[in-house]
Every structure is written in C-alpha cells, then in structure tokens.
Amino acid sequence: MGLSNNKIMKDIKIWNYKLNARNELSFKMTIKEWDYSLSENELIKSSETNWGTLDIDIIWLVNWDKTQDRKKKIQQLAMNMLTYAEKSNTNIDDLKKILYKKYNVKSRANLKIEDIEELIESYKMWIYEFSN
C-alpha cells in the first residue's frame, strides 16, 4: 500500500502481536486520522472485508537501521579522534573545534554520513602512521 503523497505515518501503535504456527505475523495497528487518506481507508476496509491482501512497505525498520548505523559511525569517529589526540599529543577539544569549523556544524551528529565515513578512514590512516 503506498502512502498518499509519500508522507510518513507517525506514532503508529502496534498491539495484539502474535506469531502463528506458520511463522506469520499478526498484529493490530492504530493509525491517527491525519496519517491516512480516504482512499487508503477504503483500500484497507475493502481488503479486510474481502479477505484480500495488500503490499505494504514498512520504512520505519529501514530508518531505524540507518539511525543505529549512523550512531555507531559517530561513536567510531569519536573513538578515532580520541585515539588520534592521544597519540599526537593534541587536545581533543581543539580537534573538535577544527572539525566543526571545517564542516560548519555544531556537533559530529550534524555531519553528513559521507563526511563521517571519510573522517573515520582519515583518522584510521593517521593513527596507523603514528603507530609505525
């Protein structure tokens, strides 16, 4: 089932979760009235009445995975920066200030994922150089 105008339904409540003998999930969900359209309502109602099936994308699982991955990468960047600071006798706060100024951000959390990944690799290389 496609969401109308590609909007995201928010604060969906899931309850009455069951896993049957065929490993099929069954649950009820409550969707706020402003998160579905009249056509979506009719489609779901018709599907339930006629025992039809719907194709639904559950994007929140993907978003949750991306959020967790991002958090892990930010943690890795923080650890790499700390290791670099210790090995190079640099103040970690100075490294952060340079980073924030270069990328025009107030926190590592505001960095683009591509920048985080690039910085992780850069710090890894610098740490490797200091280790040899």
Image: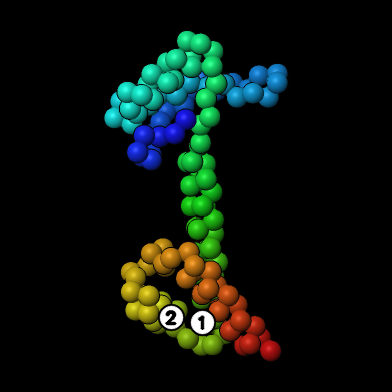
Which secondary structure lies at badge 2? Answer: helix
Residue at image point 55% right, 21% down: 53
Question: Is 113 above or below relative to 91?
Answer: above
Give amino acid for label 2.
Answer: Leu
Give amino acid for label 1.
Answer: Ala
Q: Position of residue 20 (x, y in %)?
A: 66, 19
The one nearer the camera, 122 or 33, is 33
Residue at image point 48% right, 47% down: 63
- What crowding class fits label 2: few (fewer than 14 Cα within 10 Å), some (14-19), or many (20 or more)? some
Question: Is 90 above or below relative to 76?
Answer: below
Question: Is 40 above or below relative to 126?
Answer: above
Give the position of the C terminus as an image quadrant: bottom right
**Residue 108 can be seen in this image:** yes
- What crowding class fits label 1: few (fewer than 14 Cα within 10 Å), some (14-19), or many (20 or more)? some
Residue at image point 50% right, 58% down: 70
Question: Is 49 above or below relative to 74?
Answer: above
The one nearer the camera, 32 or 74, is 32
The one nearer the camera, 88 or 77, is 77
Residue at image point 68% right, 24% down: 23
Picture quadrant of residue 12: top left
* Position of residue 131 in the picture relative to residue 112 (left or right): right
Q: Position of residue 79 (x, y in %)?
A: 54, 70
Q: In this figure, what is the number of numbered marks? A: 2
Contact between labelled residues 1 and 2, with CB atoms less than 8 Å apart: yes
Mark 2 or 1, nearer chain start: 1
Quote the CA–CA distance across marks 2 and 1: 8 Å
**Mark 2 lies on residue:** 95
Residue 85: image tag = 1
